[in-house]
Amino acid sequence: MSSKYKEILGKYANARENLVSAMQDIQESEGYISPEAVKEAAEYFSISKADLYSVVSFYAQFKFTKPGRHTIKVCKGTACHVRGSGSLLSALEERLKIKEGQTTPDGRISLERVACLGACALAPAIVVDEKVHARITLPELEKILNSLD
């Protein structure tokens, strides 16, 4: 087992009920669940890779692709949608040349759509690297993109 995962997996008894917690720790460490992590965790928990995927992929919190250096989350909740978040998402997809759920080929930006940010009074809202941006307009969106390294 790789030393990268040995420490994380070693915190858990080799029991299937610990699988989700262990995978949460791996994702927190790496930002996603890599194929190497799947292989090693499956071996550790004595299950097939298919079994591991079937459990972990049930939960929306887990990601199987490496995230970009920056993550942009566009709220599609009712208030944000009514106030134009769809236009923001379309503009981002066009500007970045990716679709929601994808990462730019250079690994710079991941684009996500979320059901609700809980910031309805700030609609339309986006989150960039955990920072909420309120009442976003297309010109402001361009400024935000230009500010990212």
Image (tube, grey):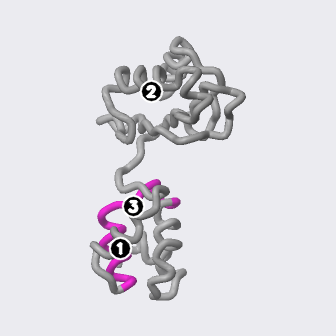
- The spot of residue 74 in percent (x, y) is 51, 33
Mark identifier at residue 89: 2
Numbered tag placed on residue 33 in the rendering: 3
The image shows residue 82, relative to residue 36, as above or below, that is: above
Mark 3 and mark 1: Cα distance apart in space: 11 Å
Task: Answer left or right for 107 relative to 16.
Answer: left
Labels 1 and 2: the sequence-earlier one: 1
Residue beneath the point at 35% across and 79% down: 1
Magenta-colored segment: predominant secondary structure = helix
Give the secondary structure at mark 3: loop
Callout 2 amino acid: Leu
Q: What's the mark number on residue 52?
A: 1
Residue at the top extreme of this rendering: 139
Give percent across and percent down for residue 105: 29, 36
Q: Is residue 73 above or below residue 49?
A: above
Task: Please name the amino acid that badge 3 sits on.
Answer: Ile
Q: Which residues are magenta?
A: 28-45
Residue 29 belongs to the span the image colors magenta = yes
Front-lying residue, 107 or 83:
83
Image spot of residue 92 (x, y percent): 42, 24
Q: Nearer the viewer, mark 3 or mark 2?
A: 2
Using the numbered discs, state the Cα–Cα distance from disc 1 to disc 2 in whole angstroms. Answer: 33 Å
Q: Foreground mark, 3 or 1? A: 1
Q: Amino acid at mark 1?
A: Leu
Image position of 103 with respect to 80: above or below: below
